[in-house]
Image: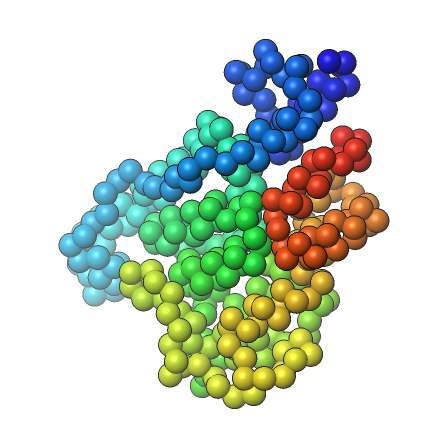
Amino acid sequence: MTLPSLINNKHLLWRAGFGAGINQFEDLHKKDIKSLIHDLFTEETFLFINYDTPDIVEGGDYMMNDKAPAEKKKEMQRVYREQNEELNLNFLDKMVNSKEQMREKMAFFWHGHFASRVVNPKFNRQILNVIRKNALGNFKDLLFEVSQAPAMLNFLNNQQNKKDHPNENFAREVMELFTMGRGNYTEKDIREGARAFTGWGFDKEGNFVERKKLHDEGTKTFLGKTGNFTGTDALNIILEQKATSKFITTKIYKFFVNENVDETIVNKLSESFYQSNYDIKKLMIDIFSSSWFYDK
């Protein structure tokens, strides 16, 4: 193998994963790009990431309540802190040691894209594994599962989004940060989207619930469509917008290829991503199989 080819292999492993492992160096010069890409996208049985410190069962979330005794509340805070730290370290261990480098690198990307911050380690564990499980799957599935995760619903205040008192935070962030990007929707779309998401919430066990009595069943006009829309309808309408494909593709290009965007390339990738019904794995293979990727 020529030196440029070896350089390309290293380039691929750094971008698609976290660099070449020690056990890869000896044979790296023998690999061609096609077989290396195949190895990167070979998936094994999915294993959930967990924390090591056992949950405190007695009292549950009551111990974080204002009425809970100070010592018990302090103990729960300590356990939560340890569990969240362990979750982070176990995710880091996966990124370093897993054979599925592409899955974990993609999960690292989505973890930043779908950023949330909550104290509850169960909720953090749930959304982390949702992201990892869907990292190379379908963006629609990923968007729906993240949007219905208690960590995200709590972080973006949708638990307080009710028909009599709509909270626009969730609808705004879903469009601005997770799907379409600024400039592709109006303030009215935010208000109408918030109405569609009314009633979305979660129970104490972290299960997604649609609270029918809190949902606004009135007619809504959202992104050019009119109807009695639910949160599910709103997400589907967002996914129908080509702006969503362009926004996601551009962000992926900046992360994996180059901060300086080649509009011609991104437009082509974006159209292909849209036509594939948001197939993430196909998009990434298209990127890593292209000659221009190794020029960036």
- Picture quadrant where residue 4 is located: top right
Which residue is painted at 65% across and 19% down in the image? 31
Q: Quadrant of the N terminus?
A: top right
Instruction: Answer whether residue 92 is visible to the viewer in this image.
Output: no
Q: Is residue 116 left or right of residue 5?
A: left
Q: Is residue 116 left or right of residue 138?
A: left
Which residue is painted at 23% across and 47% down in the image? 55
- Name above or below for residue 295 compared with residue 204: above
The image shows a total of numbered marks equal to 0
Coordinates of residue 101 in the picture (x, y in percent) = 53, 32
Between 278 and 113, the residue placed more toward the observer is: 278
Instruction: Answer whether residue 293 is visible to the viewer in this image.
Output: yes
Q: Quadrant of the C terminus?
A: top right
Which residue is painted at 42% across and 37% down in the image? 45
Coordinates of residue 17 in the picture (x, y in percent) = 58, 32
Between 163 and 3, the residue placed more toward the observer is: 3
Which residue is painted at 56% across and 68% down in the image? 235
Coordinates of residue 140 in the picture (x, y in percent) = 56, 59
